[in-house]
């Protein structure tokens, strides 16, 4: 593996380009809500102040909802276009893989302010699927921190607790590592827990709240794990 020549220049140029694009995306997502607000404002121009305040306040709320949904839709479509199609791999930090990962991660962060209001719901599940996550039937994802979606698989009827973090990547001394996270069926991932790259969680298992699964942890079916780092607690009968 060799380092990418000109990495710092590419990183700097892309940062200068992508940051304004992110704010433009937020602006485009806000435009339907702004249009709706202006239309209602014109329609209620002759109303009393208290009547207009109530109606325009509701209009702002609906505009916020539209912003969340459209933001997720735009970022999801971009994710479908730019997401890497990778198996487990590693490259030097100064590599094209890091650039591709970084661009994808920036767009995901653009969606997170909206996503936290849309989970758990079918809207959040659709977004994660568009970003490359394999989401099974009846999955409940109550977190906006399922990162590296293209490296994550979640089985049917699994529950991801509030603010749980799932990462398909990590950086070590030799560079960036990407490894799939595979979560089985009817698994419970506790609130605030952290699942690191390469972890495999068997069907029916439980990861306790605030637990941290080190990289490449393999949890067999129907076991409870907890702690920092997470360790086996007991078998589920």
Image: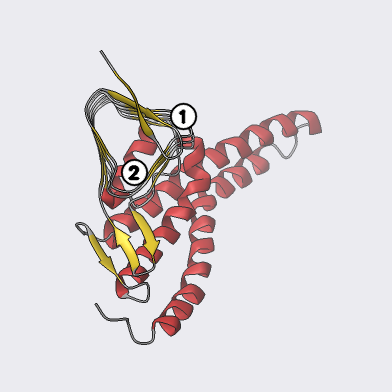
Relative horizontal placement of residue 135, taking residue 10 as reference (left or right): left
Q: Which residue is mark 2?
A: 128
Q: For numbered disc 2, what is the local secondary structure?
A: helix
* 105, 123: nearer the viewer: 105
Residue at 67%, 36% in the rendered image = 56
The answer to whether mark 1 and mark 2 are in CB contact below 8 A is no
For this orientation, the residue located farthest to the bottom is: 5
Residue with the most extreme right position: 49
Towards the viewer: 16 or 57? 16
How many residues crowd mark 1 within 10 Å: few (<14), some (14–19), many (20+)? Answer: some
Q: Residue at x 54, y 62 (%)?
A: 23
Left/right of residue 65 with respect to residue 80 in the rendered view: right
Residue at the limit of the structure toward the top, as seen here: 237
Q: Which residue is mark 1?
A: 209
Answer whether residue 64 is visible to the viewer in this image: yes
Q: Nearer the viewer, mark 1 or mark 2?
A: 1
Q: Is residue 89 left or right of residue 40?
A: left
Q: Does residue 67 appear anywhere in the picture? A: no
Q: Is residue 214 left or right of residue 198?
A: right
Q: Position of residue 106 (x, y in %)?
A: 45, 61
Q: Residue 200 has which mark?
A: none
Residues at marks 1 and 2, CA–CA distance in whole angstroms? 22 Å
Mark closest to the chain's N terminus, 1 or 2? 2
Q: Which image quarter is the N terminus in?
A: bottom left
Mark 1 secondary-structure assignment: loop
Query: Residue 167 placed where, x, y %?
Result: 37, 49
Q: Nearer the viewer, residue 6 or 216?
A: 216
Please tell me which residue is depicted at 74% across the width and 28% down the height of the picture: 51
Question: What residue lies at 21% left-to-right and 57% top-to-bottom?
Answer: 88
């Amino acid at each position: 593996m060799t380092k990418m020549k000109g990495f710092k220049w590419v990183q700097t140029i892309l940062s200068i380009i992508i940051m304004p694009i992110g704010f433009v995306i937020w602006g485009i997502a806000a435009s339907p809500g702004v249009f709706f607000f202006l239309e209602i404002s014109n329609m209620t121009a002759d109303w009393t102040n208290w009547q207009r305040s109530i109606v325009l306040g509701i209009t702002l709320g609906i505009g916020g909802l539209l912003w969340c949904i459209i933001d997720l839709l735009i970022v999801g479509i971009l994710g479908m276009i730019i997401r890497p199609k990778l198996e487990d791999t590693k490259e030097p930090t100064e590599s094209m893989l890091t650039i591709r990962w970084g661009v994808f991660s920036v767009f995901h962060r653009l969606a997170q302010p909206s996503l936290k209001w849309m989970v758990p719901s079918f809207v959040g599940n659709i977004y994660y699927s568009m970003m490359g996550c394999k989401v099974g039937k009846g999955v409940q994802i109550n977190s906006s921190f399922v990162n590296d979606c293209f490296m994550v698989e979640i089985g049917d009827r699994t529950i991801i607790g509030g603010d749980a973090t799932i990462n398909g990547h990590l950086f070590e001394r030799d560079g960036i590592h990407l490894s799939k996270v595979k979560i089985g069926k009817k698994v419970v991932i506790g609130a605030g827990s952290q699942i690191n790259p390469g972890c495999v969680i068997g069907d029916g298992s439980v990861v306790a709240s605030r637990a941290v699964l080190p990289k490449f942890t393999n949890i067999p079916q129907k076991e409870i794990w907890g702690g920092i780092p997470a360790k086996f607690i007991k078998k589920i009968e």
